[in-house]
Image: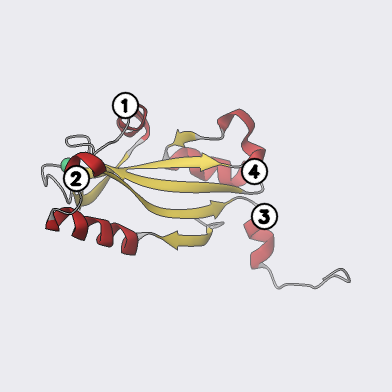
Amino acid sequence: MRTQRQVVDYALQRRALLAEVYSGRVGTNEVCDASPYLLRAAKFHGQPSDVTCPVCRKEPLTLVSWVYGDELKHAAGSARTADELTRMATLFGEFSVYVVEVCRTCSWNHLVQSYVLGTRGLRESKPRRRTAAE
Ligand SMILES: [Zn+2]
């Protein structure tokens, strides 16, 4: 997306947690704990990924994007589809997106990526002109 910025990747944390699970130090019941709310969001707003669930290996993970930000008002904390995110990126100045992967079979879930979207990013990508206040 054009206004995407401040991208944070959580692959390292994910790998570290999975290493704990594979070694048996962390039980699958501790990490496969997606709430009914998250599973519902995966069903209705999720995007299929091409990554197979690292725990049960039975199905591809579903990606759910949660949006947060003061500007969003009542929409803050809701799950959104890719199309909705694209539209919102043109409507709001700035909001955060947290992408969570979910397995709808075993309920494994983990934060994958977070980033910021919104029209303020368009202004930032133009050559910066410093103001006297900076
Ligand atoms: Zn699974």
Along the line of sight, which residue is nearer the eye, 98 or 19? 19
The residue singled out by tag 2 in the image is 60
- Whether label 4 touches label 2, CB < 8 Å: no
**Mark 1 CB lies closer than 8 A to ligand 1:** no
- Whether label 2 touches label 1, CB < 8 Å: no
Q: Which residue is drawn at 89% across and 71% down?
A: 132
Quarter holding residue 90: top right
User: CA separation, marks 1 and 3?
Assistant: 34 Å
The residue singled out by tag 4 in the image is 92
User: CA separation, marks 4 and 2?
Assistant: 32 Å
Q: Which of marks 4 and 1 is nearer the N terminus?
A: 1
What element does badge 1 sit on?
Answer: helix
Left or right of residue 12: residue 120: right
Q: Which of marks 4 and 3 is nearer the N terminus?
A: 4
Q: Which of marks 3 and 2 is nearer the N terminus?
A: 2
Along the line of sight, which residue is nearer the eye, 125 or 53? 53
Question: What residue type is disc 1 on?
Answer: Pro
What element does badge 3 sit on?
Answer: helix
User: CA separation, marks 4 and 3?
Assistant: 8 Å
User: CA separation, marks 3 and 2?
Assistant: 34 Å
The residue singled out by tag 1 in the image is 36
Question: What residue type is disc 3 on?
Answer: Arg
